[in-house]
Amino acid sequence: MERTAPGKFADHQRKLVTRPRWLIDGNYASTLPIRLAAADTVIFLDLPATTCLLGIFHRRWRWRCGQHINDGVFDRITMSFVRYICGYRRTMRPKIKRLITEHGGHARLVTLTSRRQSAQFVRQLQAAKQVQS
């Protein structure tokens, strides 16, 4: 998979957030201020490392069993990736929270701390969409 140059990636982010509606996932801290400044809602998945690791290994297992859809996601588990996940709450989380405060203070912030909360939030969105239809 070819990586995008940082400047080109940031330019692409700037173009995306000018659209009337958009949804971007991932934290990519270097370009997070671009998205936060334009966002009306920020959903912060503040999940424990064990939940994230179990999800990764579950996804990997499904892929090995032929239940994976090739969606272009580079799915490789390395020790450095596992260390990143294990240390995320200690190292990256404070940085992300600071960026949210500095660049996304105007946006609605939804913090979800478990898979159960995440599923409940999605159900609420689906119910709200049905009411609007």
Image (cartoon, helix red, strand yellow):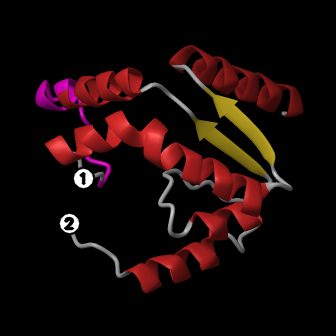
- Which of these two is toward me, 97 or 21? 97
Residue 38 horizontal side relative to residue 69, left or right: right
Percent from the top left, x then y, of residue 11?
A: 54, 83
Q: Is residue 78 visible?
A: no
Position above or below: 94 against 120 = below
Residue with the mark numbered 2: 1
Q: Give the residue type that dot 1 points to.
A: Phe
Position above or below: 5 against 23 = below
Percent from the top left, x then y, of residue 107?
A: 82, 52
Q: Which residues are magenta?
A: 61-72
**Do the CB atoms of the residues marked 1 and 2 lie less than 8 Å apart?**
yes
- Which of these two is toward me, 119 or 99? 99
Q: Is residue 68 magenta?
A: yes
Percent from the top left, x then y, of residue 77?
A: 18, 41
Percent from the top left, x then y, of residue 102?
A: 75, 61
Q: Which residue is depicted at the point 65% across and 58% down?
A: 99
